[in-house]
Image: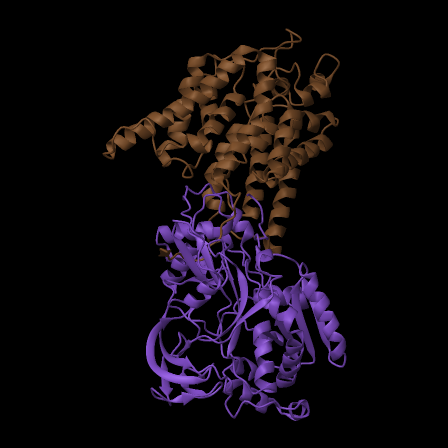
């Protein structure tokens, strides 16, 4: 009998696989894909296919070139290519679901390819990227092709704008939930709501999030803190202005917040590794999202906030201060920062009214 | 996945209800003369001499202690050979050929309870030193040094948690000889002047609690508690055990004695009983032979010095499978790998495990954070790995890599199958 020597531990957890984690995200996205096709018809299918394929194909070609440069033989079945662990497919699907329904397919393909190339591959591929490739691609679409994208509306041709689009004109415009606006049920279920392919249905996103939580395939603290921060900030604004409870509700339910919180911010590669770090990270996401929504020029800030906070991940994880648990000191400082931020936002909002 | 993993699949059901098989008459035993703690030795016997069971053959000399070398069978000395211990260190061993008579040495006599009760602290400690009692949980630390502490000991904690998977030797020991443990605890309390004794077992092992509660009725005059702790890994790690059992939170790097606690393993406790009651040194060892590459897993009581080759033969050898086998001495999470079957059973050998070797395909880290959440000492294995890879000593220092107890949980939970525990060891070496 051949004996081999290895170091302890000699046991490994049977069901712990990164592939399973990525595959779970793809499964959790499935209801959203189906809903997008149901809502937007075949055009949604094409956008999603092109989004996913552009990323997969770019990664495939990239690794073929790299392997050739490293002097390996050309093989159809590329070793370094990571489609098997669902990482790039998941990125592609998430990217596709953030896109609006009226967008030229060529824009989808170009942005997808550039997103995966610049945000993931040149950093060294899976596990090495600093920025979320899906968020990067989505921002690339907004900044480079902003004029060719549009949201179609279904119910009411006059409305034509998303709830956040309306709020962007005037932040306390409560027509968004008035008799002519959207019902809460529409905003929650996403049925008949204009918006990006996968972002409209809060209900299905929460179902997917529940699945991921039950499978422990994502860190529940990120979406909880993210949504909680936006909620608290909007409640602060509500209290300091004459807005009603519709204000926090619209902010939570509309736009890409739910989707971003559950599927994009929770990408483990681009978030800190410690529990407090992840809470700081998600808090930062919430603050930046809300600030962009309220004070910025754009109606939506989720993808920007994700990219901005991605940059801070190495700083949050820095060995001089990153700790696995909250200490009394760090918890106190953090609480003070949270309260100060809420007060500042609530006061500040009166200057932009 | 992304969560705090506390449990490790335990596989104890394979062996825990099997009776202990007695294999106390091997043809040869090999008694180690040196050990990894003690490099020097003197040997008072020569080839051809007849030795008796329990006889002192010489002395091991460590940096801060000496330890008698004891014959574990009666028979004839057959010269010295090179063998291995559980840490894969090469050892010089003296071989004794069994005469199958089990002739006990004259010093091995029963001591009446009334005599023991009148003994002073120093006398008990002297016997423990003479009988070469060491920490049998795996540390091998001389027990008499632990006992001669200057700190005021309030609690004696008997660690019977046995949180490593696959191991059931302590389980069997408690089930088969609960009385020995209570006496051992009684003597330990007497030797340290402690008022309070605690036996800690896992909550899951209800049978043991029952046995111990039953036995406790015979020792009502002593202040002994049987405490159960939650089923998690590493519940048997000193710091975790004391925290769960006594509610005393130890700071890392401090001695338990500073908190008035003296913790010993349950096997050590039983051997203290043997030493005081029968004046017998450690000659036998309960161990578990287990693992998915062993044909018939079982618990065996063997002589110290038995070659592990014989134990594998006793368990019907390896399962017929072409693949390579990992031979592990100690638990699967923290045990060491034996390079060949030439290792011997030392007093600290708790088990012999054989696993079908699996080559885990390492994928890039996805920073899921499972290792960080699961770490019992709250360090960040993934960041330590990265710091080690870029040779960043300052970061290793700041990340407290020296706190690592090498429990193996980070490698166990890793979703990318990265061998993090190995990086922890390398990181320690780099700055240590």
Residue at image coords 52%, 15%: A45
Horizontal side of A231 relative to A100 (left or right) equals right
Q: Residue furthest top?
A: A157
Q: Position of residue A129 (x, y in %)?
A: 42, 36
Residue at image coords 58%, 66%: B239
Q: Colour of chain A?
A: brown
Query: Chain letter for purple?
Result: B
Residue at image coords 55%, 50%: B373
Circle count: 0
- Compared to residue A166, the image places residue A207 above or below, namely below
- Compared to residue A89, the image places residue B106 above or below, namely below
User: Camera-side residue: A340 or B65?
Assistant: B65
Horizontal side of A146 relative to B44 (left or right) equals right
Res A64 quadrant in image: top left
- Does residue A14 appear in the picture of this structure? yes
User: Camera-side residue: A216 or B7?
Assistant: B7
Q: Residue furthest left?
A: A71
Q: Position of residue A75 (x, y in %)?
A: 29, 28
Res B155 quadrant in image: bottom right
User: Camera-side residue: B291 or A216?
Assistant: B291
Q: Position of residue A6 (x, y in %)?
A: 39, 56
Q: Position of residue A31 (x, y in %)?
A: 60, 23
């Amino acid at each position: 009998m051949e004996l081999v020597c290895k170091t302890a531990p000699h046991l490994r957890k049977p069901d712990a696989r990164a592939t399973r984690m990525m595959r779970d995200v793809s499964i959790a996205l499935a209801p959203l894909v189906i809903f997008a096709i149901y809502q937007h018809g075949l055009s949604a299918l094409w956008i999603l296919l092109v989004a996913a394929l552009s990323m997969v194909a770019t990664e495939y070609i990239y690794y073929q070139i790299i392997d050739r440069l490293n002097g390996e033989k050309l093989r159809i079945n590329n070793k370094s290519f990571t489609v098997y662990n669902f990482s790039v497919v998941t990125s592609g699907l998430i990217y596709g679901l953030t896109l609006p329904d009226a967008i030229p397919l060529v824009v989808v393909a170009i942005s997808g390819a550039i997103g995966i190339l610049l945000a993931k591959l040149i950093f060294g591929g899976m596990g090495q990227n600093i920025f979320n490739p899906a968020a990067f691609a989505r921002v690339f679409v907004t900044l480079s092709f902003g004029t060719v994208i549009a949201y179609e509306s279904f119910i009411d041709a006059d409305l034509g704008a998303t709830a956040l689009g309306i709020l962007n004109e005037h932040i306390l415009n409560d027509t968004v939930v008035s008799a002519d606006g959207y019902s809460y049920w529409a905003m929650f279920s996403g049925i008949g709501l204009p918006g990006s392919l996968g972002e409209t249905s809060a209900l299905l996103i929460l179902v997917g999030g529940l699945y991921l939580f039950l499978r422990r395939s994502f860190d529940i603290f990120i979406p909880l803190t993210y949504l909680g921060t936006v909620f608290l900030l909007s409640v602060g604004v509500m209290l300091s202005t004459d807005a009603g409870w519709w204000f926090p509700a619209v902010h939570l339910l509309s736009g890409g917040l739910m989707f971003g919180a559950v599927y994009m911010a929770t990408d483990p590669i681009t978030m800190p590794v410690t529990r407090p770090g992840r809470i700081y990270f998600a808090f930062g996401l919430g603050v930046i999202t809300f600030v962009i929504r309220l004070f910025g020029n754009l109606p939506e800030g989720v993808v920007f906030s994700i990219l901005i906070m991605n940059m801070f991940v190495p700083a949050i994880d820095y060995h001089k201060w990153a700790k696995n648990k909250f200490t009394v000191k760090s918890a106190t400082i953090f609480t003070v920062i949270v309260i100060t931020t809420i007060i500042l936002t609530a006061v500040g909002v009166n200057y932009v009214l | 996945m992304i969560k705090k993993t506390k449990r490790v699949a335990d596989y104890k059901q394979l062996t825990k209800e099997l009776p202990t098989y007695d294999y106390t008459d091997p043809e040869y035993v090999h008694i180690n003369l040196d050990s990894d703690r003690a490099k020097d030795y003197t040997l008072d016997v020569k080839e051809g001499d007849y030795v008796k069971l329990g006889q002192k053959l010489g002395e091991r000399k460590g940096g801060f202690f000496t330890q008698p070398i004891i014959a574990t069978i009666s028979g004839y000395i057959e010269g010295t050979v090179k063998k291995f211990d559980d840490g894969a260190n090469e050892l010089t061993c003296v071989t004794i050929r069994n005469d199958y008579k089990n002739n006990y040495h004259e010093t091995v006599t029963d001591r009446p309870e009334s005599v023991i009760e009148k003994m002073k602290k120093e006398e008990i400690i002297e016997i423990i030193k003479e009988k070469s009692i060491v920490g049998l949980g795996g540390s091998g630390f001389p027990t008499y040094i632990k006992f001669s502490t200057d700190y005021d000991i309030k609690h004696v904690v008997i660690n019977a948690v046995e949180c490593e998977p696959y191991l059931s030797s302590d389980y069997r020991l408690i089930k088969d000889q609960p009385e020995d443990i209570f006496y051992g605890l009684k003597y330990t309390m007497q030797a340290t002047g402690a008022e309070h004794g605690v036996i800690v077992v896992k909550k899951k092992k209800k049978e043991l609690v029952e046995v111990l509660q039953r036995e406790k009725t015979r020792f009502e005059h002593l202040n002994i508690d049987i405490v159960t702790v939650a089923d998690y890994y590493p519940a048997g790690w000193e710091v975790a055990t004391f925290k769960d059992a006594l509610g005393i939170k130890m700071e890392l790097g401090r001695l338990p004695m500073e908190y008035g606690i003296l913790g010993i393993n349950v096997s050590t406790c039983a051997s203290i009983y043997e030493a005081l009651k029968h004046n017998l040194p450690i000659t036998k060892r309960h161990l578990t032979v287990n693992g998915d590459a062993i044909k018939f897993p079982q618990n065996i009581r063997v002589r110290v010095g038995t070659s592990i080759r014989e134990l594998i033969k006793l368990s019907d050898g390896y399962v017929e499978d072409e693949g390579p086998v990992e031979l592990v001495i100690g638990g699967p999470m923290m045990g060491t790998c034996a390079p060949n079957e030439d290792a011997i059973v030392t007093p600290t050998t708790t088990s012999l495990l054989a696993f079908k070797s699996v080559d885990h395909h390492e994928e890039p880290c996805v920073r899921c954070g499972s290792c960080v959440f699961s770490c019992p000492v709250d360090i960040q294995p993934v960041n330590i790995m990265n710091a080690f890879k870029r040779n960043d000593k300052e970061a290793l220092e700041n990340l407290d890599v020296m706190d690592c107890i090498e429990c193996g949980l980070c490698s166990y939970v890793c979703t990318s199958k990265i061998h993090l525990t190995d990086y922890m060891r390398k990181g320690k070496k780099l700055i240590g």
